[in-house]
Amino acid sequence: MKDLVVNVENATVRVKGRVILDNLSLQIKRGDHHFILGANGAGKTTLVKMLMGFVWPLYGAKIEILGKLFGNYNLADLRRRIAWVSPFFQQWGNHDSTGLDLIISGVDGTLDLFRKPTDAEVEKAESIMRDLRCLHLRDQNLFTMSSGEQIKILIARAFMTDPDLVILDEPSVFLDITSREYLLREVSELAKRRDDITIIFITQRIEDIMPVFKHGFILSHGKIAASGSREEVITQENLLQAFGMPIDFTISKSGRYWPVIE
């Protein structure tokens, strides 16, 4: 379909004989802000790797990202249009890099800058940092930043390539509550400002799902267990299926869901 950014049909992925994704189908429209909720082991990481073309489903599946059918298009070119942000990236980078270095490295697809940047690249990086309110980290070394600040730098890095699709892969998983709330506020503001970009937010915590993510999926044991609006997806019945335990929740004035476990 022309307005679909993600179109997955009947995808099964096996790793070492184990089914990780099981006949999975999902569609995400251009400009939508979606969440994917699932417990550890649900298949979230494998799903992201499949969308990026790093793992492939069994024969008979159809994977179409940004209108490009897997098998008929150069995946290296496609990946330049996708911003994949993961907290694990910060462990791989050079901690002596400055914030500006790491952001500009996104142009080259590396986690360090091995050349002198152009004036245009510096100007663009600084503009993105202003939008994300992290320009003060321009010349700061990565290892002196907090986890939340590092994630913001990685998000800024992702935007250096003007992506059409942004995948935020559990960005708050290593953060304390203060850093998490700071990051989620910034992600929410980013989604409000950039309704031209499709954003997928992946998490294992219902309280991370900000109201700006109006639609989503629950992934459970490699299958889509629920899909639809936030209100349709986040229910006691669906959470029981996703996490294997009864979870009640309250809804705050801001519209966020907070788990209550007796």
Image: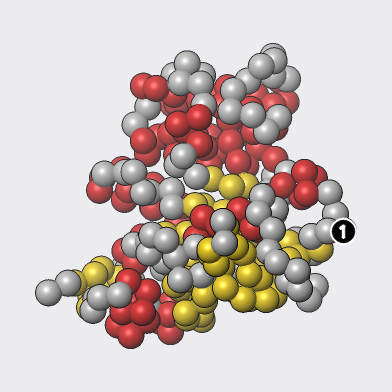
Amino acid identity at mark 1: Asn
Q: Quadrant of residue 118?
A: top right
How many marks are shown on the rendered structure? 1
Residue 139 appears left or right of 245 = right
Residue 251 appears left or right of 42 = left
Q: How is the image coloured?
A: secondary structure
Residue 191 spot, x, y in % from top left: 52, 57
Do we see residue 240 in this rendering?
A: yes
* Quadrant the C terminus occupies: bottom left
Residue 215 appears left or right of 26 = left
Residue 40 spot, x, y in % from top left: 38, 59
Do we see residue 5 in this rendering?
A: no
Q: Residue at x 62, y 47 (%)?
A: 83
Q: Nearer the viewer, residue 114 or 141?
A: 114
Q: Quadrant of residue 72?
A: bottom right
Q: Residue at x 69, y 19 (%)?
A: 117
Residue 171 appears left or right of 105 = left
Q: Nearer the viewer, residue 82 or 62?
A: 62
* Quadrant the N terminus occupies: bottom right
Examine the rendered structure and indicate whether residue 254 appears above or below residue 191. Answer: below
Q: Residue at x 30, y 82 (%)?
A: 236
Residue 119 spot, x, y in % from top left: 71, 20
Helix, strand or loop at label 1? It is loop
Q: Residue furthest right?
A: 72
Task: Mark 1: give few (<14), some (14-19) or many (20+) Cα within 10 Å.
Answer: few
Residue 54 spot, x, y in % from top left: 66, 50
Residue ID for mark 1: 72
